[in-house]
Image (cartoon, rainbow, N blue to C red):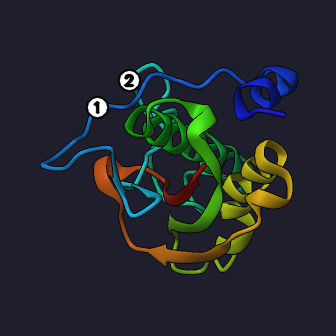
Amino acid sequence: MTVSARLAELGIELPAVAAPVAAYVPAVVHGGVVYTAGQLPFQDGALPATGKVGAEVTPEDAKGYARICALNALAAAADAAGGVDRIAGVLRVGGFVASDPSFPGQPAVINGASEVLGEIFGDAGRHARAAVGVSVLPLDSPVEVEVSFLLA
C-alpha cells in the first residue's frame, strides 16, 4: 500500500508545509534520507498552545501536539522529496518537550509522534528516538519534533 493510500485509509490529511520561523528550510534531501527541521505543532499557521508541559500544558495535550509535529514533518519531507509516496519509512525522531522542572514524562509526550508514524508506515515506521526535556522552545511552543525519513 502506498503512503498516500494509507493516509487516506487513516483519514489523515497532511497540512501545508509550515513556513520557517528563522533562517532554515523545512527539509533537506541528502543520500537517500530526508532530514526535517524541527517542526512545531502549527495548525493553520498558529500554535494551539504555549507554555511548559506539566504546568500550563497537560501531558495529554502535549502528546497530541507531538502528533501534529510529526505530521508537519511528514508534510515537509514529502514536499522536499517530490511527494509523500517517495517516503519509504522513518529512521529517527528527535523530540523536545518544554518541561516544567518537575515534569519527567518526555518519552510519553513524544510517543504522540512515534505512534502516528507507526500507524502510517507500519514496520517501516519503527525508528530510533530521543525525547529530551528543555527549558524553552521557539515561540514558547510546548513541543518540537524533527524526523529523518528514508526515501523509496
Q: Is residue 127 left or right of residue 29?
A: right
Rendered view: 69 above or below 1:
below
Q: Provide residue 49's location: percent of width, then percent of height.
A: 50, 39
Q: Residues within 10 Å of mark 2 (few under 14, many from 20)?
A: few
State how far apart marks 1 and 2 are (Cα).
8 Å
Q: Residues within 10 Å of mark 1 (few under 14, many from 20)?
A: few
Q: Provide residue 11's location: percent of width, then percent of height.
A: 81, 20
Q: Provide residue 83's location: percent of width, then percent of height.
A: 52, 29
Name the residue at 53% across, 24% down.
Answer: 15
Name the residue at 69% across, 45% down.
Answer: 61
Is residue 131 or residue 61 the one in the foreground? 131
Q: Decide: marks 1, 2 in contact (CB < 8 A)?
A: yes
Rendered view: 90 above or below 83:
below
Q: Secondary structure at mark 2?
A: loop
Q: Secondary structure at mark 1?
A: loop
Q: Provide residue 126's location: percent of width, then percent of height.
A: 77, 66
Tell us which disc is closer to us: 1 or 2: 1
The total of numbered circles placed on residues is 2
Give the image quarter of residue 92: bottom right
Can you identify the residue that label 2 sits on? Answer: 45
Can you identify the residue that label 1 sits on? Answer: 19
Amino acid on which disc 1 is placed: Ala
Name the residue at 85% across, 52% down.
Answer: 122
- The mark nearer the N terminus, 1 or 2, is 1
Name the residue at 87% across, 23% down.
Answer: 9
Amino acid on which disc 2 is placed: Gly
